[in-house]
Image (tube, rainbow, N blue to C red):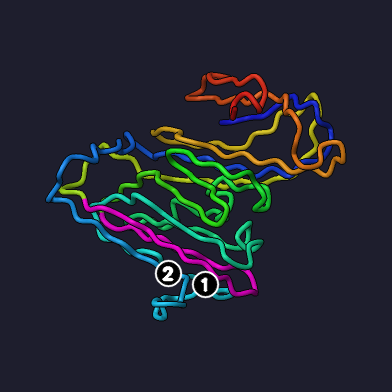
Amino acid sequence: MMKTRRFFLANSLMVAALLICASQGRTVRADDIAKIKPEVRTGFGNAGWNLDRYEDLEPLDAGKTITLGDMKGPGVIRHIHMTRHRPKELFARGIVLEIWFDDADEPAVRCPVADFFGDGCNGDSKYFTSNLIECAPWSYNCYIPMPFAKRARVLLRNDTDRDAKCYAYVEWESLPEWDASLGYFHATYNRKCFQLTKETDEPFFEIKGKGHVVGRQFSVVTDEPLFKGYMYVMEGNNEINIDGQERQIDYLGTEDSFT
């Protein structure tokens, strides 16, 4: 369970956070890209852009759900790419990413697109590039490996009353056989509004099961004029309790856990 406490800021905040974990076992390690693997097959699926040479692609119209990829396992998703052409503001919260694995009754990922890709401040976050997630000026990329035994589906859902224009695709590889030690990727989105004081002890996530926490995205929006533009230092400790042990990870201030 992750908590944030003892912020010096006493105004209301809107918090959006993303926690990513594997449900069991280990995550897939990066392969040696120089190794020839004739037994591996690559796959590609795209949607959203029905212009140019892609007139047959399914557009992301108002209220519609489109499929980027419907993959047969065993395999592993290697890359998810998405542009955000127009209207840009829709992608902050109006477009939802869903990822389904095997025969699950619920998606392993159900999250607003911008928050999933680390663009949590209503689509106005700073651009950045990392090994796993990228928030570029006009596109998003995710390189987190997502293995699946039987089937995987990647969907985009437009929850607004306006058509969205984007081009998105997913790339995946086949696996020769399923390794039971592989974990399934999950992402949990949580958004809340609360008042922060010296006594605040606000839990963000509680996850049960065997796995690894491989990343988190934390965005804060406040209406306090003193902190306009998000240029402020957050002194609240970030605590993570693991397997009943309190404060097993204890960051001295939110800024220390991300910089």
Q: Position of residue 136 (x, y in %)?
A: 54, 50
Q: Residue furthest right?
A: 225
Mark 2 Cα shell of 10 Å, populated few (<14), some (14-19), many (≥20): many
**Residue 82 in the image: x percent, y percent?**
48, 59
* Rendered position, 179 above or below 168: above
Residue 219 lies in the magenta stretch: no
The span picked out in magenta is 150-174
**Mark 2 — residue?**
47
Q: Secondary structure at mark 2?
A: strand
Residue at image position (73%, 44%) is: 14
Quarter of the figure that contains the N terminus: top right
Q: Main secondary structure of the magenta part?
A: strand
| Observer-nearest of 102 and 112 | 112
* Residue 233 occupies quadrant: top right
Task: Look at 63% across and 26% down and name the residue there.
Answer: 238
On screen, residue 143 versus residue 19, left or right, reads: left
> Which mark, residue 104?
none
Left/right placement of residue 195 relative to residue 176 reads right
SS of the residue at dot 1? loop
Tags 2 and 1 touching, CB below 8 Å = yes
Q: Which residue is mark 1?
A: 60
